[in-house]
Amino acid sequence: QVQLVESGGGLVQAGGSLRLSCAASGRTFESYHMGWFRQAPGKEREFVAVISWGGGSTYYADSVKGRFTISRDNAKNTVYLQMNSLKPEDTAVYYCAADGSWGGSSNYYPSYWGQGTQVTVSS
């Protein structure tokens, strides 16, 4: 098992940038593929990005491709989501996630979740 704690959310102007962090504990961090999801008001939770346990492979939702970057620092047991060129439609609660399996592309179904951090983008 693993515990995940997100941080870095907040209010930002459209076109701005924000970096989210996710600190993991409770299990060997390197054993998990790590990802980010988000949930906007009134909508279902959607996939954002995933990174392999070694950091060599990543995949992004079309809605964020070219603007967001997922990365990890295994020495710090931390995953990041760098968000650039933010749009009001990016407003959502962002959740960090972990799982031992990744089927490729967006076929990622996490077993562990963080509590979420709010990101609000104003126009």
Image: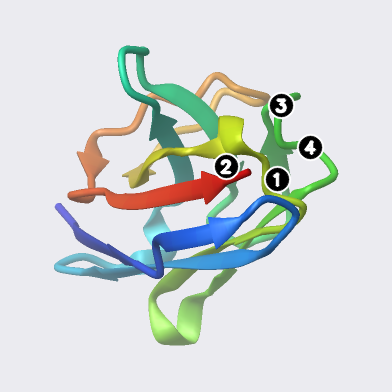
Left or right, 67 with reference to 50: right
Farthest top residue? Answer: 43
- Residue sitting at 54 percent across and 60 percent down? 12
Q: Which residue is mark 1?
A: 58
Q: Does 101 sit above or below residue 45?
A: below
Left or right, 98 with reference to 85: left
Location of residue 47 in the rendering, given as x and y in whole percent from the top left corner:
51, 27
- Residue sitting at 59 percent across and 39 percent down? 49
Farthest bottom residue? Answer: 75
| Residue 50: assigned label | 2
Q: Earlier in the sequence, mark 4 or mark 1?
A: 1
Q: Earlier in the sequence, mark 2 or mark 3?
A: 2
Label 4–label 3 contact, CB within 8 A: yes
> Disc 2 marks which amino acid?
Val
Q: How many marks?
A: 4
Q: Which residue is mark 3?
A: 63
Label 3–label 1 contact, CB within 8 A: no
Q: CA distance from mark 4 to mark 1?
A: 11 Å
Location of residue 66 in the rendering, given as x and y in whole percent from the top left corner:
85, 44
Q: CA distance from mark 4 to mark 3?
A: 6 Å
Label 2–label 4 contact, CB within 8 A: no
Nearer-the-camera pick, 113 or 45: 45
- Callout 3: 10 Å neighbours few (<14), some, many (20+)? few
Q: CA distance from mark 2 to mark 4?
A: 12 Å
**Which quadrant would residue 25 be assigned to in this image?**
bottom left
Label 1–label 2 contact, CB within 8 A: yes
Location of residue 24 in the rendering, given as x and y in whole percent from the top left corner:
28, 68
Q: Which residue is mark 4?
A: 65
Q: Does 101 sit above or below residue 10?
A: above
